[in-house]
Image: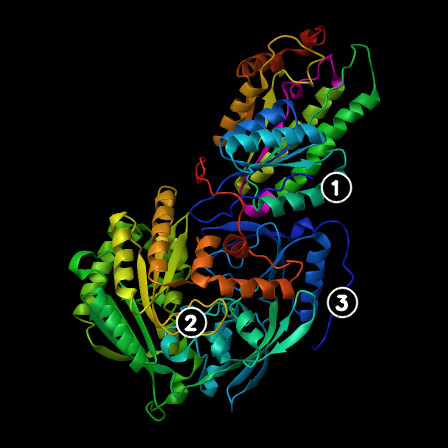
């Protein structure tokens, strides 16, 4: 135990109304009003726990709000936004060990360490999430098969329980593996010590390769995941028939020492920065509006066909150097790209299936969407390895991430499709990912996590958070059994 | 102890509307609750009279086969309690799409009676209670850039008449407040519906009786339809739009000689 903060709660009967703030999920498919607080110091977090306790309110932590689903929403409750706790507390350029507060973003991390020749060991497809948020769902990157999840590179962290007590955890503690991945439902990580990855160049050696079908894509991903540091596949999810699952692979490798003739230049921030305009002309801030008209079945089909044709011909087996930022943060190329999906937003459905059953499961998933006239517009394929974190999404197999547009006309059909996909994934022994999910229900969560894991999680929750102060919309949706049956809403979805 | 709501949490693919009705135990409030429940709304129902409120909730929940309505005992004249009740409602419902203020009282006032106690009772319920609730609703909806406020005003808000000056004043004040909220909040995506019903056959009007008295179910249907269309002002039943057009334009020289 480090310190314990006690604080007399200010009892004026209710949380101040002027704290009410509209919060959305990253997919803009959900919103809710919450009482938002933005502390700058750990002492204030302890005070906020006391505030929640005094007013009988639930509390959730929020980072950059980049979860696709409802992980950082707590409608009608308190949301503690940790983005102002964004200080780098210690950095050792010799060992690559960095200590940060939870509101530090992935972008801050690489900007802080790059020029000394270090890079975050695992990064998601965007640089905007915070370290706290990343640990809550224990994200992976395109190097998951090689480097594991983000949590595997944490050396130690300080953790505050809802009673205000702070404890230290290292990978030797069993609790370490429960807290990382626990969606902020056991307490809050207040400082983290991370091991960064030594790099010898600001560039990666990248190879692009198109594959004509799903089997080809899976084999290439598997092969790449064993040989390359990074591997990611794009799948044209609108293509059916013999070309089902066709797409393009990008493999990336760190450069060995001495391979980059001018590492100081490639390791500069300027070299990594993404351009502000497309072709030097179109401001990228406008790009999502230009994309909007193309985000329908015909538009995406045309774009995908052209992209596949180009990758099969011009881009086949192309080797080139690309900066870490350009390779890893594909999603940041188009700022606010998710807004192109329109008023209903999007949901992402990412499922993780063991390698033995992946081909048949993914083929069926792609076919099912096409048959319902609800193809997904962006399919991403990755190779994974299992990890020992409690609420882990990982399997020894593959994941397929799919973006579905939600509209007022398709939501009922889409819900039916998603339930069908859930069954396909569960039958294949697959898992789901809370960073992306917005549709799972307790019975599905129980089936993929298993009774033992769930009981372990619930007993830790009862021990660390006996008053159940910590609740998010995701926690209520996925972990609290609703005693009522789910009925279809007779009322119109939007009106 | 009232039954809490057990609603399945919303997902992007399945969500439902949620409404709060203040003054829901009888008359128009109860009819509105039944009508909105039939449309699939989840409801928080508030009123002083707990037994009536619980009977209504049970009736709605039995009919729909799920806990769709929950009862919250509340007296609108206890304005100090409103912020914490609102916090509870928001935490229970998770989101609020519509706030419907129905609560109203109308003591019988004789033609030659001047009674501040009775007038104040009406101001407390219609005006002070209404404002205290709508301040909460307006803050939420303004922040959310959306939502709906429904205020039950009255045809009595249009002109001061001989029968019950305090009632006219309370409803006119509430009506003006609703109009001001509309002017503030329309630009924020919030719909403010002012309902001006004629006399409705409820306990409140049992003492007056009279011409053109409407059934609460019929009025509730009109209101829910207007809510769905996000209208601004509703006279219900419809004939009151025409009657009040005439009444509003009646010259004072005639109006002050009438006993209407």
- Circle number at residue A6: 3
Q: Cα distance, mark 2 to mark 3?
A: 37 Å
Q: Nearer the viewer, residue A80 or A448?
A: A448
Dot 1 corresponds to which residue?
Answer: B81
Q: Residue at x 65, y 11 (%)?
A: B251
SS for dot 3: loop
The coloring applied to the image is rainbow
To which chain does the residue with label 2 belong?
A: A
Residue B50, image x, y percentages: 70, 31
Q: Decide: few, some or many residues near mark 3? Use Cα within 10 Å; few <14, some 14-19, many ≥20.
A: few
Residue A202's spot in the image, x, y percent? Answer: 38, 83
Q: Residues within 10 Å of mark 1 (few under 14, many from 20)?
A: some
Q: Are marks 3 and 1 in contact (CB under 8 Å)?
A: no
Which residue is pictured at 59% across the width and 74% down the height?
Answer: A101
Q: Which residues are magenta?
A: B140-165
Q: Can residue B34 be seen in this snapshot? A: yes
Q: Quadrant of the C terminus of chain A?
A: top left
Q: Are marks 2 and 3 in contact (CB under 8 Å)?
A: no
Picture coordinates of residue A96, whole percent (x, y): 50, 86
> Is residue B117 covered in magenta?
no
């Amino acid at each position: 135990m480090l310190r314990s903060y006690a604080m007399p709660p200010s009892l004026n009967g209710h949380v101040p109304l002027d704290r009410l703030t509209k919060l959305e999920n990253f997919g803009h498919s959900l919103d809710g009003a919450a009482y938002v607080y933005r502390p700058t110091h750990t002492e204030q977090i302890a005070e906020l726990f006391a505030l929640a306790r005094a007013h009988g309110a639930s509390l959730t932590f929020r980072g950059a709000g980049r979860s696709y689903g409802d992980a950082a929403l707590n409608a009608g409750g308190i949301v503690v936004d940790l983005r102002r706790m964004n200080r780098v507390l210690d950095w050792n350029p010799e060992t690559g060990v960095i200590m940060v507060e939870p509101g530090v973003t992935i972008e801050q991390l690489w900007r802080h360490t790059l020029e000394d020749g270090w890079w975050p060991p695992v990064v998601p497809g965007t640089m905007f999430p915070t370290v706290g948020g990343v640990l809550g769902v224990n994200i992976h990157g395109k190097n998951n098969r090689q480097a594991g999840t983000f949590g595997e590179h944490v050396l130690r962290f300080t953790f505050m329980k809802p009673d205000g007590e702070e404890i230290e955890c290292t990978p030797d503690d069993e609790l370490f593996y429960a807290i990382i991945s626990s969606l902020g439902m056991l307490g809050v990580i207040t400082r983290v010590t991370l091991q960064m990855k030594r790099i010898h160049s600001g560039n990666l050696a990248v190879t692009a390769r198109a594959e004509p079908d799903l089997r080809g894509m899976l084999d290439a991903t598997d092969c790449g995941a064993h040989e390359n540091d990074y591997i990611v596949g794009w799948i044209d999810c609108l293509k059916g028939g013999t070309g089902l699952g066709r797409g393009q692979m990008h493999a990336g490798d760190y450069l060995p020492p001495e391979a980059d003739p001018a590492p100081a230049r490639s390791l500069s921030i300027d070299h990594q920065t993404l351009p502000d305009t497309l072709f030097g002309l179109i401001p990228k801030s406008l790009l999502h509006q230009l994309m909007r008209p193309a985000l329908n079945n015909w538009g995406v089909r045309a774009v995908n066909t052209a992209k596949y044709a180009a990758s099969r011909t011009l881009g086949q087996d192309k080797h080139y150097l690309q900066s870490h930022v350009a390779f890893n943060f594909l999603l940041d190329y188009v700022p606010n790209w998710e807004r192109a999906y329109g008023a209903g937003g999007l949901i992402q459905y990412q499922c993780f299936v063991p390698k033995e059953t992946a081909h048949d499961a993914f083929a069926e998933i792609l076919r099912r969407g096409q048959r319902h006239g609800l193809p997904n517009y962006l399919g991403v394929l990755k190779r994974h390895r299992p990890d020992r974190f409690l609420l882990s999404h990982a399997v020894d197999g593959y994941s397929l991430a799919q973006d579905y547009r939600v509209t007022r006309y398709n939501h009922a059909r889409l819900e039916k499709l998603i339930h069908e996909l859930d069954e396909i994934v569960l039958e294949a022994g697959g898992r789901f990912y809370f960073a992306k999910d917005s549709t799972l229900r307790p019975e599905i969560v129980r089936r993929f996590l298993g009774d033992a894991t769930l009981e372990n999680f619930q007993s830790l929750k009862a021990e660390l958070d006996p008053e159940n102060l910590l609740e998010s919309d995701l926690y209520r949706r996925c972990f609290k059994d609703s005693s009522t049956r789910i009925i279809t809403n007779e009322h119109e979805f939007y009106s | 102890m009232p039954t809490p709501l057990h609603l399945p949490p919303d997902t992007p693919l399945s969500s439902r509307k949620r409404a709060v009705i203040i003054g829901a135990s009888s008359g128009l409030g109860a009819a509105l609750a039944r009508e909105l429940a039939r449309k699939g709304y989840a409801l928080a129902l508030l009123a002083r009279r707990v037994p009536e409120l619980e009977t209504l909730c049970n009736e709605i929940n039995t009919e729909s086969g799920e806990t769709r309505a929950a009862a919250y005992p509340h007296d609108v004249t206890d304005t100090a309690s409103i912020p914490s009740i609102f916090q509870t409602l928001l935490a229970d419902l998770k989101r609020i799409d519509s706030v419907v203020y129905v609560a109203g009282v109308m003591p019988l006032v004789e033609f030659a009676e001047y009674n501040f106690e009775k007038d104040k009772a009406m101001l407390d319920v219609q005006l002070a209670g209404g404002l205290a609730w709508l301040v909460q609703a307006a803050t939420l909806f303004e922040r959310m850039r959306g939502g709906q406020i429904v205020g039950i005003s009255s045809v009595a808000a249009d002109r001061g008449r001989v029968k019950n000056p305090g009632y006219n004043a309370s409803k006119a004040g509430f009506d003006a407040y609703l109009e001001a909220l509309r002017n503030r909040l329309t630009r924020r995506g919030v719909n403010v519906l002012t309902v001006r019903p004629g006399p409705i056959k409820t306990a409140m009007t049992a003492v007056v009786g009279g011409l053109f008295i409407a059934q609460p179910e019929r009025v509730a249907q009109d209101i829910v339809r207007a809510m769905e269309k996000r209208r601004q002002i509703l006279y219900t039943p419809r004939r009151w739009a025409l009657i009040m057009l005439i009444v509003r334009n009646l010259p004072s020289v005639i109006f002050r000689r009438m006993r209407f």
